[in-house]
């Protein structure tokens, strides 16, 4: 009996000591204190700093507006951020705002701001025939001529900031460059430019130069001569087919007294596919412009603006479709617009994915106190002019138009001649204006940076318009001042919803 009692006492002692084999109280391995209070499984993470973590919250961040409001420093790699980044501010934060989302992403107190940048200094103020731009990989190319014997290609990034430039040395040197245009083919970027040479007698040429994505010529900078004639002036306009496999080249000799539109097609290497022929004769009217547009069926649409020589009467706009070899298709159409209407063609946005748009005509109605922009759709199905938007009072409203993923975007300069220019100044600089835009929803906005109008030059009042990443739009334009004498390529980025 005594031995039984001793055994029972021993068992009770072992249970009270909490033996590791005791079934009455399971082992607990969470929260065990090791090495001066360090918890083995305390749950501390990189973003600790909350009341539950046992570590004090981070201090407030430097920026306090917009998406940064209320942000506190995040715990990263064992410490709080010394300078707050997106880890502290959140996924909507951007150091430099690029999105069109109605948020103040860079926390400067302004949502979706416009950005006005000096892209590059220029030698002079080229008109729209001497200046062109084109989207390329990672940004844009801009080509310009000083009107004499040189051509410059600028490389801009996706935000329209200057990254570099290429000067094309032309040999033999022409006395004049009468136009420059950038296009994209199935093989890459190509430059077309027109020149005038004095010897052995005055004659004009049109050159084709393949470029890389940085704007440098692939091969000799003078490229391949595709057109030549015994004239002192030639204007040219080029449109690549939608697949980029052929290019329609239009030209007219001695513009201002020209009566004929000539055309040919070449491949992406500049080799002739369809020989040159006369596409339209405008006699007794004179040509003021000729333009070509690629169509979804592989053909092209040709437009010619015609006026009585020396007259400011209404302009006759001649339109006709041509096939891939520039042979006429269907009937022509004639529209009448005001003198100086500057009609331009583009394709509407496709109605379905993988489809192509229909040709449309955009032009201005420059007369009156409030000039209007109008659009003609269904060009060959009795389409009539539809008003797009009325502008502010101005002497002229030069414009840029492009079809984006969201629809038609317009930008224009409402220009006025300075009422009291400085005495002795050059009258070509006595022009100022404001930059406006119309979004696909019909919203009209004054995008001029600041209250003061933009100083302009009368010959360089064009706008080149492009869609940018993040839903932004980009406008390229020229500003100019007489004193001091400056010419500047400017870029404006804005959100046009």
Image (cartoon, rainbow, N blue to C red):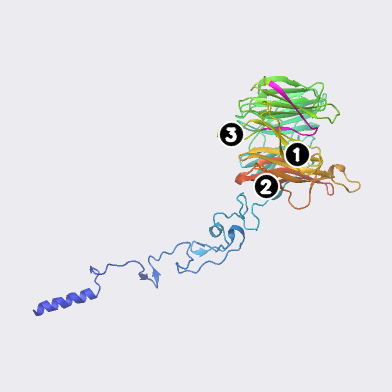
Q: Which residue is mark 2?
A: 493
Give the vertical position of 399 relative to 252 (above or below). Answer: below
Q: Residue 483: in sight, yes or no?
A: yes
* SS of the residue under disc 3: loop
Percent x, y of residue 241: 63, 28
In the image, is 407 to the left or to the right of 424? left
Q: Which residue is mark 1?
A: 372
- Rounded to the nearest angstrom, the CA distance separating label 2 from label 1 is 24 Å
Type of secondary structure dominating the magenta stretch: strand
- Rounded to the nearest angstrom, the CA distance separating label 3 from label 2 is 28 Å
Q: Decide: marks 3, 2 in contact (CB < 8 A)?
A: no
Q: Residue 486: in sight, yes or no?
A: no
Q: Which residue is mark 3?
A: 351
Sort mark 2 into few (<14), some (14-19) or many (20+) by Cα contacts within 10 Å: many
Give the vertical position of 30 relative to 274 (above or below). Answer: below
Count all numbered tags in the image, as a single digit. Answer: 3
Percent x, y of residue 292: 70, 28
């Amino acid at each position: 009996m005594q031995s039984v009692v001793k055994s029972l006492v021993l068992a009770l002692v072992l249970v009270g000591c909490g033996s590791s084999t005791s079934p009455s109280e399971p082992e607990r391995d969470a929260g065990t204190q090791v090495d001066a209070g360090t918890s083995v499984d305390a749950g501390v993470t990189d973003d600790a700093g909350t009341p539950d973590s046992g570590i004090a919250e981070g201090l407030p961040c430097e920026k306090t507006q917009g998406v940064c409001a209320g942000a506190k420093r995040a715990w990263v790699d064992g410490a709080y951020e010394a300078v707050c980044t997106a880890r502290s501010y959140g996924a909507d934060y951007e150091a430099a705002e690029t999105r069109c989302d109605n948020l103040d992403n860079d926390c400067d107190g302004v949502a979706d701001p416009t950005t006005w940048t000096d892209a590059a200094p220029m030698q002079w103020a080229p008109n729209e025939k001497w200046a062109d731009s084109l989207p390329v990989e990672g940004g844009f190319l801009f080509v310009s001529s000083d009107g004499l014997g040189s051509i410059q290609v600028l490389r801009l990034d996706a935000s329209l900031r200057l990254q570099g430039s290429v000067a094309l040395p032309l040999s033999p040197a022409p006395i004049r460059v009468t136009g420059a245009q950038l296009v994209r083919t199935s093989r890459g970027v190509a430059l077309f430019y027109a020149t005038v040479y004095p010897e052995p007698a005055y004659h004009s040429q049109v050159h084709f130069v393949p470029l890389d994505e940085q704007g440098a010529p692939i091969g000799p900078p003078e490229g391949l001569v595709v057109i030549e004639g015994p004239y002192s002036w030639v204007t040219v306009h080029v449109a690549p087919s939608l697949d980029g496999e052929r290019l329609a080249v239009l030209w007219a000799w001695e513009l201002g007294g020209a009566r004929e539109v000539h055309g040919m097609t070449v491949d992406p290497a500049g080799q002739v596919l369809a020989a040159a022929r006369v596409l339209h004769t405008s006699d007794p009217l004179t040509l003021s412009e000729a333009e070509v547009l690629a169509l979804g069926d592989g053909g092209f649409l040709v437009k010619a603006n015609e006026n009585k020589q020396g007259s400011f009467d209404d302009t006759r706009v001649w339109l006709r479709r041509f096939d891939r070899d520039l042979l006429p298709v269907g009937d022509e159409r004639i529209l009448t617009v005001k003198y100086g209407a500057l009609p331009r063609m583009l394709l509407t946005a496709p109605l379905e994915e993988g489809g192509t748009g229909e040709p449309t005509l955009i032009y201005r109605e420059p007369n009156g106190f409030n000039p209007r922009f109008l659009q003609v759709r269904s060009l060959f199905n009795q389409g009539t002019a539809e008003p797009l938007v009325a502008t502010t009072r101005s002497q002229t409203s030069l414009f840029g138009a492009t079809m984006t993923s969201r629809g038609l975007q317009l930008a224009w300069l409402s220009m006025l001649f300075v009422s009291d220019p400085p005495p002795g100044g050059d009258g070509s600089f006595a022009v100022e204006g404001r930059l406006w835009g119309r979004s696909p929803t019909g919203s009209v906005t004054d995008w001029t940076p600041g209250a003061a109008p933009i100083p302009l030059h009368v010959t360089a009042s064009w706008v080149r318009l492009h869609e940018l990443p993040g839903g932004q739009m980009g406008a390229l334009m020229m500003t100019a001042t007489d004193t001091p004498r400056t010419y500047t390529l400017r870029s404006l980025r804005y959100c046009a919803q």
